[in-house]
Image (cartoon, rainbow, N blue to C red):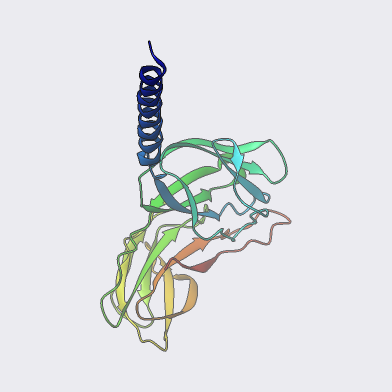
Amino acid sequence: MNSKTHSIRNVVLMSTLLAVLFASCKKNEDVVPAPVEEANIIIKHASPDAPNVDLLVDGVKINTSAIGFNTNTGYLKIKAGARNIKVNAAGSTTSVINSNLTLAKDKNYTLYAANRLSNIEPVLVEDNLTAPAAGKAHIRFVHLSPDAPAVNIVNGAATTNLFSSVAFKSSTAFTPVDATAAGTAFTFNIRNATTTANVTSVPATLLAGKIYTIVIRGFVTPPTNNTNTLGATLITNK
C-alpha cells in the first residue's frame, strides 16, 4: 500500500470515528429526563393530646421544624404515587402513625393526624382548589374533635344549616359563600346535630376568590392537665 492510499484510508477511518462519536453525543443530548410527578400536601396536627411531631415520607423527614397541635405545614411538594408516611414524635424514631398512601400527580391533599394519642390515625382529604366564581369564597369544615358529637354548621343567624350532621373524622365539600375583595366577616355557629345546642362558634373573614378550611378540634372535656379545649381553626388553602 503506497503512502497516498494509506493517508486516504486514515482520513476515512477518522471521519467515520468522528461521525460515530458525534451521533452518540447527539443521542445523549436528546435524552431528556422524565419530569418528577408531584402532589401537594398539607400536614395538620389535630390530635389534642399528642406531642409535637415530625413527618417522614419514605423514611425522609420533610418538615423543617416540629409540628405542634393545631399547627400545619402549608403545602409541601412530594413525589406522587405510593408513599409511606410516618408521623413521629418530634426528634425521635418513634412512629405514632405509619401508613401507606397513594397520592395522584398534581392533586392537592391535607393529611390530618387525628384522634386521641392512644388511637391516633391519619385522615387524608383531597383538596379541590378549583377557583371560586366571581364574588365567592369557598369554605369547608373538617370535624376532628374526638369527644364532640356530630354537628351542624350555621352561617350566623341563618335558619338553615350550611352543613348538617358532620361527624368526627368527616369533612364537607368546599361550598361557595358570598364574599368581597375587602373581606366579609362571618360567624359560623357549630351546633350539636341532635340537640341543636351551640358547642362553639368561629369568626372568619373570608376574601372573594379564596379557599378555606375550618377544622373543629380539641376536647369538649379535656383530660387532666390538658388545655386543648374545643375550638375551630381557619386554614387558607389558596
Image quadrant of residue 212? bottom left
Q: Residue furthest top?
A: 1
Q: Looking at the figure, which quarter contains the C terminus?
A: bottom left
Q: Looking at the figure, which quarter contains the N terminus?
A: top left
Q: Is residue 119 left or right of residue 173?
A: right
- The answer to which of 9 and 190 lies nearer the viewer is 9
Q: Could you tell me which residue is drawn at 54 percent across and 36 percent down?
A: 58
Q: Could you tell me which residue is drawn at 42 percent across and 75 percent down?
A: 188
Q: Could you tell me which residue is drawn at 43 percent across and 59 percent down?
A: 142
Percent x, y for residue 223?
A: 66, 53
Can the viewer see residue 5? yes
Q: Residue furthest left?
A: 133
Q: Is residue 125 above or below residue 102?
A: below
Q: Is residue 3 left or right of residue 226?
A: left
Percent x, y for residue 165?
A: 34, 59
Q: Is residue 69 left or right of residue 168?
A: right
Q: Is residue 106 above or below residue 13?
A: below
Percent x, y for residue 72?
A: 56, 59
Can the viewer see residue 161? no
Q: Is residue 198 above or below residue 180?
A: above
Q: Is residue 89 above or below residue 195?
A: above
Numbered-mark total: 0
